[in-house]
Image: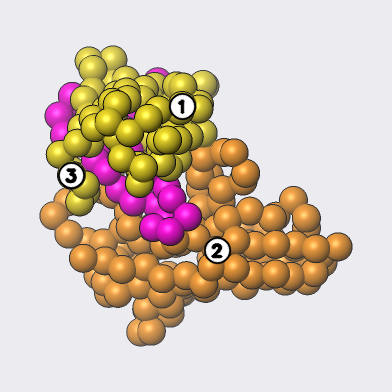
Chain colours: A yellow, B orange
Amino acid sequence: KAGVTQTPRYLIKTRGQQVTLSCSPISGHRSVSWYQQTPGQGLQFLFEYFSETQRNKGNFPGRFSGRQFSNSRSEMNVSTLELGDSALYLCASSTGTGEGDEQFFGPGTRLTVL
Amino acid sequence: GEDVEQSLFLSVREGDSSVINCTYTDSSSTYLYWYKQEPGAGLQLLTYIFSNMDMKQDQRLTVLLNKKDKHLSLRIADTQTGDSAIYFCAVLPLSGGSYIPTFGRGTSLIVHP
């Protein structure tokens, strides 16, 4: 069974630009969650999509948005990039139907904003 | 909301036991997890414990839960250099049917020969 894949693995952008990151979950998983990981703040939850609908949302500004397609693949978009958006962005997939069901993480996309 | 705290660093000698500690605030938490992150990789679930358990053992890993003190620990016996990684504690609060755990900041475990 293929794991969670994220593309691209590395990305360099400049302030003010926008970026789109992609996540393909494990086959059969309907939930995709996105996290931002930085040395200072640790792992922070961005949002979760389940069956093409945003089901949970963290405390991030509206510049951060996402969507999920009918095949459960998800994209995350960050508009008007700021230096502080430099981070490792992780996505995790799960069945999303049971409390405590395991989240499987992808390797992440390393975003650097110059 | 839920708050999860971990110490940032732990250094041990190869062959010794490592104990990584975590405290949390929401006493209604149902599932408590330990994840491992190796350099350049995502998080991998190591083990988890239900809130109605006090201890869980899985090969070299022992998880202890003290619900009264809201304290979770992960003990790694016979620590090896390959155990060097960041270890995250995560807690699933019982609130609103959300299945999203809250993560601590991670403890960097450094194992030296």
Residue A97: which disc? none
Residue A113: name its quadrant.
Answer: top left
Q: Which numbered dot is residue A11?
A: 1
Q: Quadrant of residue B51?
A: bottom left
**What is the spatial separation of the Cα atoms under label 2 and label 3, in whole angstroms?**
28 Å
Q: Residue at x 70, y 62 (%)?
A: B110
Q: Nearer the viewer, residue B28 or A109?
A: A109
Residue A61, position in %: x, y?
18, 44
Which amino acid does the dot numbered 2 rest on? Thr
Q: Nearer the viewer, mark 2 or mark 1?
A: 1
User: Do the dots labelled 2 and 1 sit on one chain?
Assistant: no
| Residue B81 shows in this picture | yes
Q: Nearer the viewer, mark 2 or mark 3?
A: 3
Q: Is residue B63 visible?
A: no
- The boundaries of the magenta stretch are A27-55
Question: Is residue A49 one of those drawn in magenta?
Answer: yes
- Label 2 Cα crowd, 10 Å radius (few <14 / some 14-19 / many 20+): many
- The CA distance from mark 1 to mark 3 is 21 Å
The secondary structure that dominates the magenta segment is strand
**How far across and how far down the image is residue A48, in percent?**
24, 38
Q: Residue at x 58, y 55 (%)?
A: B86
Q: Earlier in the sequence, mark 1 or mark 3?
A: 1
Mark 2 highlights which residue?
B107
Mark 2 and mark 1: Cα distance apart in space: 26 Å
Does the stretch in magenta take in B78? Answer: no
From the top left corner, tell me how far across and down residue B104 is, in percent.
Answer: 41, 62
x and y, in percent, of residue A6 in the image: 45, 25
Asked if badges 2 and 3 are on one and the same chain, I answer no
Q: Is residue B30 left or right of residue B5?
A: left
The numbered mark at residue A61 is 3
